[in-house]
Amino acid sequence: MKVIWLALCLPSAFVTAAKLPRRTSGPSLQHDLVKEAAALARLASRRAQKAPKSHKAGTSCPDNQFPPVNITVQGVGYLEDVLSADLLAQLQTNLAGHPDWEIGKPWTLSMVADSVERQMDRKFGFAGGEGFNVFTVKKAQVGQLITVTDKVKTLAANTRLEYRGHDPITLEDAIHLTNICLRPMTCDAFFEQHKTECLDDDLWKRRKNPEEVTGHTRSMCCERMKCKEEAPCSPPTMYTKRPDYDTAFGSKPDQCCVPKACSEDLCKSSLWVAKPGNVLGSTKDECCVPLDCDDYKCSAKYVKKQKRRGQDGSPLLMQGSTDSECCEPISCKHINCEATDEWKTNESATVGASLEDCCIPQFCKHHSCEPVTKWEPKPKAILGSSNPSCCTPKLCRDFDCDSGFQLRAGAVIGGKGLLGSTHNECCEKKSCHDWKCSDPSKWVQQADEGSRGVERHGWSDEECCTPLMCSSIDCVPESLWQPKSAEELEGLLGSTSKQCCNPKWCKDYTCTGDIPEQNVTSTKWYKKVDTNHFQFRGSTDEECCHPKYCSEYTTQFPSKFRRKPEDQEKPRLGSTEAECYDELKCSDYCCKGKDVQLKEDAAQLLGSTDVECCEKPN
Ligand SMILES: *C1O[C@H](CO)[C@@H](O)[C@H](O)[C@H]1NC(C)=O
Ligand SMILES: *[C@@H]1O[C@H](CO)[C@@H](O)[C@H](O)[C@H]1NC(C)=O
Ligand SMILES: *[C@@H]1O[C@H](CO)[C@@H](O)[C@H](O)[C@H]1NC(C)=O
C-alpha cells in the first residue's frame, strides 16, 4: 500500500509547486492519477493473493472433491487407473454429490508432481471422450506445479483418473502426486482464460480472492461496481453526488455524479481569465487561467516590475493585468523638461515617462514675437517660448533702402541675414568711397577713412567732399573777371573765375582813343558792337575793340606820304597818315626837270614830285 500512496501524492506535490503551469488540464491529470492508482491497487492485490497459494494446499483449495491423499504412481499401463478402487469410489461419490459435476462444466485439477523417471514424461487424465483434464508429469523433476482446467466429459459414476501414456510405468516410486485438488473452475482460472475481463471496465470489477470463488462467467467472477464504494465524484469541487448515488452502479463521474460547471463570475478579476470552453470546477485553479504580467503592457507612466525567481532560479509567475499588479511608476526625475524651450518643469508632477507627463507645455500663442520689426508669428508653430521657435524672422534682405543708403553689412551674407524691417535696422549710408563729388571744381573728395580708421559713410558732397570756397580764388584774367562783393562771396563755392567772379563786359569799356563825351573816336580801334545775342566780354582794346590796321588805310596823298614799314609780328594800327605814314619832305626830293629847282621852303613842304617841290628859278 505504501507504493500506491506515493504514486498518488507525489504528482500532486508537483502541481502546487512554484509557477502554475499554463494549461487547462489540471483536474484531468488528477483524474488520470486516480484511475491509475485504482488499477495498481487491483494488480497488487492479485499478486499478493496468488503468491502463497500453491504451497498451502488443502487450506487454499476450497470445495476440493479429491480425496485428501498423496498418490504414488508405479506399475501402471496404458489407460489403467491411477487411483486404488476405494479412493476411486470415494472420488466418484464426492462428484456425484456435487451439483456442478455436469457434462460441459469446467473443473480445475491441480497438484504438485515429483518424477524420478529418467526416460520419459508421463501423461495422465480423466477418462471420457479423448480424455479431459489431461496433464503431463515431466521426467526427472520434483515440485512440478500442475494446473489444468477442462470441461467435464463424463458422469460422476464413470469418472476415473488414468495413466494415458502407452509405455507402462515400471519404476518403483516413479511419480508422486501431492496436494491434489479437484474442484469446479474458480474465477482465477476464468481470468487466466479471459485476461482483460472486468479489468478496464467502468461497471464491472473482479470479485475479491477469485481463486476461492467458483465461477466461469463474468456474472460469477465479477461484481457490478457501486458508486457509493467507488466514490468517483472527486474532486468535490467539480462533482456532486447524483440523487440516487447510494444505489447507483458505476465507477465514473458520468455514472455517479452531477458535474459542476465553472461559474462565470469566478474569474472576474484582474488576476484571472476564464478558461475557454465548458470547464468543470468551482475553484479558481480549476476554472481560470492566471493572467501573466508578461502579457500586460504597462501604461505610459509605468515600467514592468522586476521578475521574481524561485530558489532554483526559474521565474515565478507574476500574476495580474493592471499597472498596480505588474508595474511600478517611473519618476519624472528622469525627464529633462528644460532641454528645449517647448516645456517647463511641472513641479507637481512626480510620476511619468514622457514630456507630456512631467512637464508643462509652452505654447507659442502665449509668446509675443518682439520686436515686431524683426519677428512675426510663425503660423504653424505650436510649442515654444522663444523667437526662434515661435516666430519667423523678418529679414532686411528684401528691404528697399532710400537712395543714398544701402543694406547694412550682414543683411545678405551667410544666408541668415540681418533681421529688421525698418530703414534704421536695415540700411546704412553708402560709403563715401563710392560717392563722386558732384563738381570737382567746387568739391574735393575726402579721404575714404575717417580719423579713426572707420570707413566714412555718406552719400553727398557735404558728407564726402571738402568744399572749395570762392573767397580764396583770384579772379583771373583780370581783364575778363572782377571779384564779387564780399556779400556775394559768402558761402559761394568754386575754384574758377567763372564760378567765383563777375564777368567784365565790353559795353563798359572804352576803346583807347575814344572820347565819347567829345565825339572823338579812336583812330586805332573801333568798338565791338554787342548784339541781342552776344555781348562782348573784356576790359581791353584787344577784347572789346576791333583793330584798325594801317594796312587797310590808304592816304589820298600818296606823293606826300610814304607807308611806314610793317612789323610782321605786330601789325601797325592806325587810320591816319600820322600813324601809318612817314612824311615825304621835299627837302629830300631831287627835282627832275631841267629848268626847275627845289623850292626855297622845301624843308617844310611835303611832296615827291617836281610839281610839289620844284619851281622855276626866278
Ligand atoms: C557829336 O556828333 C553827333 C553826330 O554825329 C552830334 O549829334 C553831337 O551833338 C555831337 N556832339 C558834340 C559834343 O559835338
Ligand atoms: C502428502 O505429502 C505431503 C508432503 O509431500 C505431506 O505434507 C502430507 O502430510 C502428505 N499427506 C498425507 C495424507 O500423507
Ligand atoms: C502638473 O502635473 C500635475 C500632476 O501630474 C497635473 O495634474 C497638472 O495638470 C500638471 N500641470 C500642468 C499645467 O500641466
Image (tube, grey):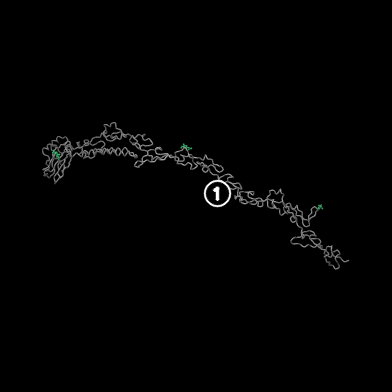
Residue 161 vs residue 152, the one in the foreground = 161
| Image coords of residue 547 (percent x, y) | 76, 57
Residue 520 in view (yes/no): yes
Q: Is residue 438 above or below residue 349?
A: below
Number of marks: 1
**Position of residue 567 in the picture relative to residue 348 (left or right):** right
Quarter of the image for residue 288 reads: top left
Q: Is residue 556 above or below residue 270?
A: below
Residue 184 vs residue 179, the one in the foreground = 179
| Image coords of residue 567 (percent x, y) | 75, 62
| Image coords of residue 491 (percent x, y) | 68, 48
Quarter of the C terminus within the rendering? bottom right
| Image coords of residue 60 (percent x, y) | 18, 37
Q: Amino acid at mark 1?
A: Ile
Quarter of the N terminus within the rendering? top left
**Position of residue 398 in the picture relative to residue 537 (left or right):** left
Report the residue that reaches farthest toward the front. 452
Is the residue indicated by label 1 positioned so its CB lies within 8 Å of ligand 3? Answer: no
**Position of residue 268 in the picture relative to residue 75 (left or right):** right
**Position of residue 242 in the picture relative to residue 306 (left or right):** left
Residue 446 vs residue 283, the one in the foreground = 446
Q: Secondary structure at mark 1?
A: loop
Badge 1 is on which residue?
Answer: 413
Report the residue that reaches farthest toward the bottom. 594
Quarter of the image for residue 420 reads: top right
Residue 138 in view (yes/no): no
Quarter of the image for residue 278 reads: top left
* Label 1 packing within 10 angstroms: few (<14), some (14-19), many (20+): few
